[in-house]
Image (cartoon, grey):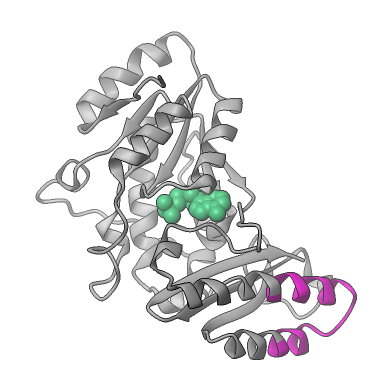
Amino acid sequence: MAKRPLVMRTVSSLRRTLAPWRKRGQSIALVPTMGALHAGHLKLVSDAKRRADRVVVSIFVNPAQFAPHEDFGSYPRTFDADIKALGEAKVDLVWAPTATAMYPGGFATRIAPQGAALAGLEDKFRPHFFGGVATVVAKLFLQVQPDFAMFGQKDYQQFCVVTQMAKDLDLPVKVIGIPTVREKDGLALSSRNAYLSEAERRAAPELARVLKVSASRIKAGEPIEMVLEEGAVEIARAGFSLDYLEARHAVTLAPVASPKDGPIRLLVAARIGKTRLIDNMPV
Ligand code: AMP
């Protein structure tokens, strides 16, 4: 039977567990998650295991990155199954702080990321989001002090924001971006896919299909604006309400007019029923 990972709930117990590992010179990789684990998270874990001697997975549904009208209360929580999967993946430690361990009474500091965090993508629709993410990720980095931190490119703007934050604050951690794990039909794995009805699930791969077709058309030299306009129509036809479908510089997330402007990333966010899905692909 797989060994159950250690589960720590307070900063002091976490530090007590990590100290001897660090003393022995063992490298540590952190995989931050909000739980409801799927094969995408587990890919981050397996890549972490390849890079470091010890793997820490954090599970924390961070209230600071949800607006009051968003799905904090209903976000899927599958702690026991998560622990079992992490045991099978031979994870050493699960850092699952309580909300009060993370935000004790009187907590009064917040990181305000700029640059990629103000690109006019997710931030336009979730203005509170990156401040909440940057603050909790900075705390996770200081709590665990990992050598490596694994982030999914599925949340591409988040990956850019966290990479920049670590650089700007001289945090001694290497942020690694892991390509998106997808279902056979192209749908990016996401904990929020659990919200989809059967009909919505059938429509959902349209986002990835449009991204893929648009990327190859842009690569072939077709005008970006026209390709994206047609893509937006197809996404709407599949039953989505589109928040954005954009071509951006892959590092700065600045708008791009042509492939000459640098490496391009296509990013999409759209709502179907009560579910909001995001995805992205390189050109
Ligand atoms: P979450 O629990 O949704 O906050 O995600 C935790 C981490 O897993 C983030 O770095 C995500 O980008 C990453 N992740 C989520 N879905 C996928 C996926 N389909 N493929 C790769 N990484 C993912």
Quadrant that contains the N terminus: top left
Residues rendered magenta in the picture: 210-230
Between 109 and 209, the residue placed more toward the observer is 209
Between 70 and 185, the residue placed more toward the observer is 185
Residue 224 at x, y percent in the picture:
77, 82
- Determine the image quadrant of residue 268: bottom right
Residue at the (22%, 63%) spot, across then down: 73
Using residue 143 as the reference point, say whether residue 156 is left or right of it.
right
Residue 175 at x, y percent in the picture:
55, 42
Residue at the (30%, 65%) spot, across then down: 66
Residue 269 at x, y percent in the picture:
53, 75
Image position of 280 with respect to 102: above or below: below
Between 57 and 37, the residue placed more toward the observer is 37
Which residue sits furthest right?
220
Image position of 228 with respect to 31: above or below: below
Image position of 255 with respect to 35: above or below: below
User: How would you classify the magenta stretch by its main secondary structure?
Assistant: helix
- Determine the image quadrant of residue 87: top left
Which residue sits furthest left?
105
279 magenta-colored = no
Q: Is residue 116 visible?
A: yes
Residue at the (54%, 62%) spot, across then down: 157
- Determine the image quadrant of residue 86: top left
Image position of 47 with respect to 33: above or below: above
Residue 266 at x, y percent in the picture:
67, 71
Residue at the (41%, 62%) spot, across then down: 194
Quadrant that contains the C terminus: bottom right
Using residue 15 as the reference point, say whether residue 32 is left or right of it.
right
222 magenta-colored = yes
